[in-house]
Amino acid sequence: MKDFSPVYIPVGVPTFHLESAKDLFERSINFLLDADPDFVVPDDMLLSVDEMTAYISDLEPDFIVFQDLTFANAAYMSEVISRFDCPVLLWTLREPVIDGTRLRLNSLTGAYSAANAMRSYGRTDYEYVFGSPEEDAVTGKIKACVKAARIKKDMQGLRLATVGEPPQGFDFGRAHEDEIREVFGAETVSISVTDMIERAKSYTDEECMAFMERSHELTTGLGKTPEKNLRDHARLYKAYSEYIRENGIAALASRCWPDYFTEYGTPVCAVLSMLNDDGTAAACEADMYGALSMWTGMQLSSSPVFFGDPVSLNEEENTLTFWHCGTAACTLARRDTGAAVGVHPNRKIGPAMDFGCEAFPEATIFRIGREPDGTYRFFILEGEALDKPKQFTGTSIVIKTTAPVREAVEKSVLDGFEPHFVVMKGYHAETLKALARMYGFKAFVY
């Protein structure tokens, strides 16, 4: 990933109470450097446009925290946005004392001044937070925005791959390479299923030994797979892994049915599972926006994510079950079963993963959705992954949602979201909302 440079720009004027401003300046720096040690901070408060301009003149920020220590007029923000086109968070402070005497900071008025300048330049992608450096709402908001800005930076230059085309009726996941480059700054390469199969067939058993060993290491019961399918799985695992390595791929969307059953005789399900364990976001049914959603979730949660369909609704438990044919990362499996291996639920050919996922107390359901006009939007819903066994043949996870589940389902169906979603560990709604705003996307928070 590229280096990420967050920058703190604390501005004001010398006619307010500088002792109070200085105290908040120092406390703000302490928090920001603790939140992200890469923050660039000035040696002192920036109390004129000239001082600020001298400070920012050699910087190339990827994210800006613009703080009104005291009131500052629109010239400060106008100078910043005339130079930089990166995400901005406006931060204004509480008055330290209200005692009927002088106004110490007048920071809040500065927020209106700066925000109005942003709007005048046509910028609506900024975020805002009000409060002191130790307030939970403030620290949480800033940390979420830093994470979002880092993800946005890391997407630029990301290498994505498609293996084959989406099957009939699954065009919602089709990669639009020009849009992906323009909107996210990511590049897309592609290979046909036929070419990937030919790669796999070209390897000897000896050349695939490490991939066979890795597969046994990750799974339970793989040895029950017929020998031919087992060898073909290892070949396919090597073919995908080598293609990813050669092309520097971070996220991959692969066609799966019917080709790997009809042309190869062995499914790709378990291969995609293991790629997710190996750190590459790998989605099936050639869903590129699903793969990009998976990559985003992996950055936020620092672990593999679940990818699947919403298939079962239980109003009494307020739960929604997500399922897919057998591609979940092995490390998501319940500890009592391990990453059990079975066969594809429809084609009855293996190996495909066949387990329920482990419980975790905080979960976020997410999707980067694409509208027919080429605009993008986010689906966001939080909940808890419950301690539930496998629900159906394949891989499944049961989420108790924080919102009324029936209402969330009905609304998102009426909103026309795609049928593939990501489930990640942790609560990440605030970061995802900030990321949506940085891109100018609409966030559907259910």
Image (cartoon, rainbow, N blue to C red):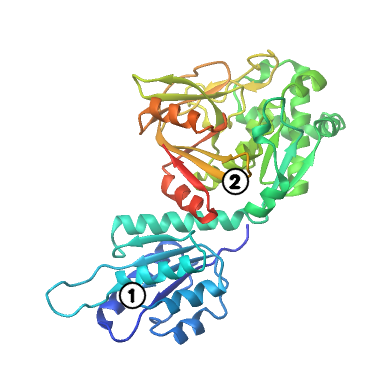
| Three-letter residue code for mark 2 | Thr
Q: Earlier in the sequence, mark 1 or mark 2?
A: 1
The quarter of the rendered structure image containing the N terminus is bottom right
For residue 342, which quarter of the picture?
A: top right
- Residue 298 in picture, x, y percent from top left: 55, 43
- Residue at the (15%, 71%) spot, across then down: 98
- Residue at the (55%, 38%) spot, across then down: 304
Q: Nearer the viewer, residue 430 or 412?
A: 412
| Three-letter residue code for mark 1 | Leu
The residue carrying pointer 1 sits among few (fewer than 14), some (14 to 19) or many (20 or more) residues within 10 Å by Cα, namely many
- Residue at the (69%, 33%) spot, across then down: 286
- Residue 421 in picture, x, y percent from top left: 54, 33
Can residue 281 be seen here? The reply is yes
- Residue 192 in picture, x, y percent from top left: 81, 34
- Secondary structure, mark 2, is loop
Q: Nearer the viewer, residue 189 or 336?
A: 189
- Residue at the (78%, 24%) spot, across then down: 232
The residue carrying pointer 2 sits among few (fewer than 14), some (14 to 19) or many (20 or more) residues within 10 Å by Cα, namely few
The residue where tag 1 is placed is 69
The residue where tag 2 is placed is 375
